[in-house]
Image: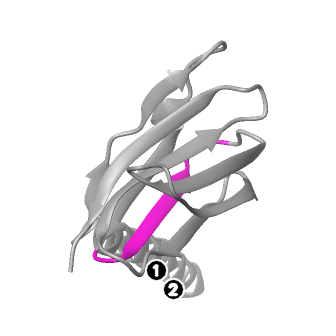
Amino acid sequence: MRHTKIKQFVLLLGLLSQAVWCNAVGTSIIDGHSHIAIKAANVQGMPKGSTIQASINGHALTVVFAENLGQVDIDLTTASGTPVDCFSIQTPNGVILFIPNPGDYVITFTLPNGDIYYGEFSVTD
């Protein structure tokens, strides 16, 4: 009987530590980040803009895809349209980009079905 109670206690402790760890990680990710609103530019299918989450913290741009959207093309330009970076990412993953220069930027996401979303943000020193 005592052996069963010890097993239950260890299992409960393991489950609680996981919950506490996940909650702590979630909090630290949000602290200091400014949310970037993702807007639809050209959407033919079911809107997916809410599944793209972006934020800026200093010079670090963080993008997280909350669901599998397939291979997404990402273009980063200055507000005046000068290309800064472009690449593709397989979702549901995320990426962190370092933006060295202060200024105004636009990040554009093109989904495999041709839907386009974008977000505007500023990097300050």
Callout 1 amino acid:
Phe
What residue range appears in magenta?
58-67
The reply to whether the C-beta atoms of the residues labelled 1 and 2 are less than 8 Å apart is yes
Q: Quadrant of the C terminus?
A: bottom left
At 56% from the left and 80% from the top, the residue drawn is: 1
Q: Nearer the viewer, residue 89 or 12?
A: 89
Left or right of 121 on screen, residue 6:
right
User: Which mark, residue 9?
Assistant: 1
Residue 73 in percent (x, y) is at: 71, 48
Q: Nearer the viewer, residue 75 or 21?
A: 75
As displayed, is residue 120 above or below residue 85?
above
Question: How many neighbours does mark 2 have within 10 angstroms: few (below 14), some (14-19), or many (20 or more)?
Answer: few
Residue under pointer 2: 6
Local SS, label 2 = helix
User: Which mark, residue 82?
Assistant: none
Q: Does the magenta portion include 115?
A: no
| Residue 124, quarter of picture | bottom left
As displayed, is residue 104 above or below residue 97?
above
As displayed, is residue 68 above or below residue 1?
above
Callout 2 amino acid:
Ile
| Residue 90, quarter of picture | bottom right
Left or right of 50 on screen, residue 59:
left
Residue 81 in percent (x, y) is at: 48, 49
